Amino acid sequence: MSFASSNKKIPATVVTGFLGAGKTTLIRKLIEQAGDKKIALIVNEFGDMGFDGELLSDCGNPNCTADDVVELKNGCICCTVADDFLPTIEMLLKRDPKPDHIVIETSGLALPQPLVKAFQWPSVRASVTVDGVVTIADASALSDGHYSQNEDAIAKQRAQDDSLDHESPIEELFADQLKCADMIVISKADLVDDEGMARVEAIIGEHAREGVKNIHSRNGDVSAAILLGLDSVAEDDLDSRKAAHDHHHDHDHDDDHDDHDDHDHDHDHHHDHHHDEFHSIVVPPRVFASMEDVKVSVEKALAQPGILRVKGYAALEGKKARVVIQAVGRRVDSWFDTSGEAKTGLVVIGLKDFDQAAAEATLS
């Protein structure tokens, strides 16, 4: 399976979510799908509640070993960027061979925006880019009116972290994690009924950026083709990722927060299944008239129910070079490929029951 970024830099995926949401389970499943790709994993859990070093023990991927796991135990990653995170990235870049992809599991206390901003650091920016931010939300907890199934453990985690320089209420941390996301995974979706899922999606819809997709998971079963290779270059897109309570380590909070059980909104975050199964097809694309034709056509495909991503290559009238297409949510990126390859084809990835004929009609 190929989930490589089109960017020449090493892609990094940031996985965020509260303690117990399912980050480690999801990452384990991603590693299982890595094939011959070498994944480096940076883990920012600590204390007796953190990562136990056994994530890879049975993953079945010989390319991902204990040496490829770096644990940051000196505190919240967003508060120790200069001391811990940046030196770790620089260390990974000195390895031979370098990793094909870096996955970062943050502490549930981490504000993702400062971490993403760290990729603007000169020693990192030239070689690594934020491929995407994946936020995991616990359906079981949210449907019951909580942000985590064990908020006491989060409080304990906060108390253990002497380096923590923000005291953001849990609801603000949750909002920040969603606002920064390129993809949102609703974990434990099989544990809630239709009414509960409606509450979950309403809560998420209040904070997620427009066009960001929700996918439902059970036991971390999400295709790597959906979560990796997003090409978001998030470090250059921070302005769109500011939450309603924008911290950036200038923490002057208003503690008067609305109860998140009160929602009267209409959000474009609906699914028919509590556990999403995925399917992909390869569409032989038509020869597009222009880059605008590419953009409009792919946007129409993405707007169809159940379609999550479109990526691949297409031809343009009067042009020898083929066009590279990477699209997710409502973002469509396209550029000319100078490699000289002539092969074209678009991969459409979506929920198992998406209308394949409609997708083909839009793109072929």
Image (spheres, grey):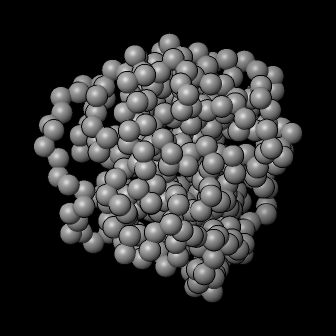
Residue at image position (33%, 20%) is 165
* Rendered location of residue 154, percent (x, y): 41, 36
The residue sitting at the top extreme is 83
Residue at image position (61%, 43%) is 24
Q: Nearer the viewer, residue 12 or 311?
A: 12
Q: Please tell me whether residue 166 is drawn above or below residue 281 in the rendered image.
A: above
Q: Nearer the viewer, residue 107 or 50?
A: 50
Q: Quadrant of the N terminus?
A: bottom right
Q: Please state if 161 lies on the left or on the right of 65 as rendered.
A: left
The residue sitting at the right extreme is 62
Q: Nearer the viewer, residue 241 or 290?
A: 241
Q: Please state if 330 lies on the left or on the right of 127 as rendered.
A: left
Q: Quadrant of residue 169?
A: top left
* Rendered location of residue 187, percent (x, y): 52, 58
Quick check: can you spot residue 77?
Answer: yes
Q: Quadrant of residue 143?
A: bottom left
Q: Please tell me whether residue 234 is drawn above or below residue 230 in the rendered image.
A: above
* Rendered location of residue 23, percent (x, y): 56, 45
The number of callouts visible is 0
Q: Quadrant of the C terminus?
A: bottom right
Q: Please state if 208 lies on the left or on the right of 186 as rendered.
A: left
Residue at image position (72%, 68%) is 345
Quick check: can you spot residue 232?
Answer: no
Residue at image position (70%, 30%) is 53
* Rendered location of residue 136, percent (x, y): 49, 51
Q: Please tell me whether residue 17 is drawn above or below residue 358 in the rendered image.
A: above
Q: Please state if 30 lies on the left or on the right of 144 as rendered.
A: right
